[in-house]
Amino acid sequence: MSQLPRFFRIRRHDNPKRIVDVPNAVRSELAAAGIRFKPGSRVAVAVGSRGIMNLAAIVRETVEWLKEQGARPFIVPAMGSHGGATAEGQAAVLREYGISQEALGVPVTSSMEVAELPRGDLPVPVFFDKKALEADATVIINRVKPHTSFHGVHESGLVKMVAVGLGKHDGATSIHRLGVNGLRDIMPLVAAQGLRHGNVRLGIAVVENSNDETMFVRAAPAERIVELDREMLVAAKAAMPSLPASDLDVLVLDEIGKDISGLGMDTNIVGRLKIPGQPEPEAPRIKMIIVRSLTARTRGNAAGIGLADIITRRVFEAIDFRATYENVLTSTFLERAKIPLIAEDDEQALRFAGQAAGMPALAEARIVRVKNTLRLEEAWISEALHPEVSRLASVEVLGEVARVFGETRLMAEL
């Protein structure tokens, strides 16, 4: 194998805004929203599959706040076709995040049953979780962030949760069938109908900073959910993290998964869409992407694996093809599930990447290794990047890395 370059460990010090006391912030926002629930009323608390820092704490405070008013809250998954598009799978996803009856003291009612709401003149039906609709009210909780397939006024967040998350598999399928246009243009209209004819009374939006920490928690009554979602997306885009350099020969991701991004890796970070007819992002420009493992919480769902060029044997053997195909078929973007080259180990993966990138002398390659596309505050950079990256005001070079690849442990465990 071509000799590896020297590698250096770096840490970014962006000092982004973050909330120190998340439970107190949730309480303050809920009080400020001015919404009260009648004693004895049944309230569905809708929670998605997005990996959100402090999610269990945010849901717990919401549930306790509802109980204190005499309401009878219960949890419903609001994640479209995720979790293998089964009630059991979606409940299991929530359990992985600490959302369960044992943890919160309220039932988790997972069902794929939906009710159809009036669609007006929309080209698709409007679906709403039947168990949630049978309640007296629904509260939705979701992180607001840029989407991995399109950009618009509303992307991932509260509006999408109403249209796609609470629409379950039927709602997700009907909107995704229209491709990018369905997500960008039709999805907000479906959400408007859902808010008009459903029983959503309150929305809680979460925005995370570049270090994957809770930066904002905002609550709003149903009539302000669309406005709140729009405002929080602007804040989320401003807080997006980035790789330490825009031009790379190789990007090594220690892991991808649904808990990292809806597509396993964030397309906004890696600069790849793989959607027919849609232009690829101008930056960053990465010749080769290597993926080393799937997260435990993705439960074998490797949606987005097609964005990579090379994966290890360990990744391939961890794939649950049923869950992956269900997710990707719903989205209709099949390119994103195609299997990359399979390397037996890290050494072979790097050799493949060097050959394909036209860099047989790996010692000269521009390589970055990170844990995943959420955790970018720490990275390993090759010697060729050192002069450029070390000049950045927010970067601290922590020293040379003794052993770079070949181990089975992930970066964060070293």
Image: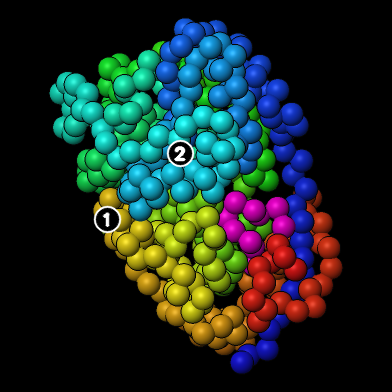
Residue 197: numbered disc: none
| Image quadrant containing the N terminus | bottom right
Res 160 → quadrant: top left
Residue 329: numbered disc: 1
Mark 1 residue element: helix
Contact between marks 2 and 1 (CB within 8 A): the answer is no
Res 209 visible = no
Under mark 1, the amino acid is: Leu
On the image, the x and y values in percent for residue 101 come to 52, 36
On the image, the x and y values in percent for residue 361 come to 62, 87
- Along the line of sight, the residue nearer the viewer: 11 or 247: 11
Mark 2 residue element: loop
Q: Which residue is mark 2?
A: 48
Relative to 101, say whether 269 is above or below.
below
Q: Which residue appears farthest toward the right when viewing the image?
A: 399
On the image, the x and y values in percent for residue 312 come to 51, 77
Tell which tag, 2 or 1, sits nearer the viewer.
2
Left or right, residue 383 beside residue 125: right
Res 241 visible = yes
Q: Residue at x 78, y 48 (%)?
A: 13
Residue span colored magenta: 369-378
Relative to 96, say whether 56 is above or below.
above
Left or right, residue 216 beside residue 167: right
Q: Residue at x 54, y 17 (%)?
A: 66
Left or right, residue 155 beside residue 235: left
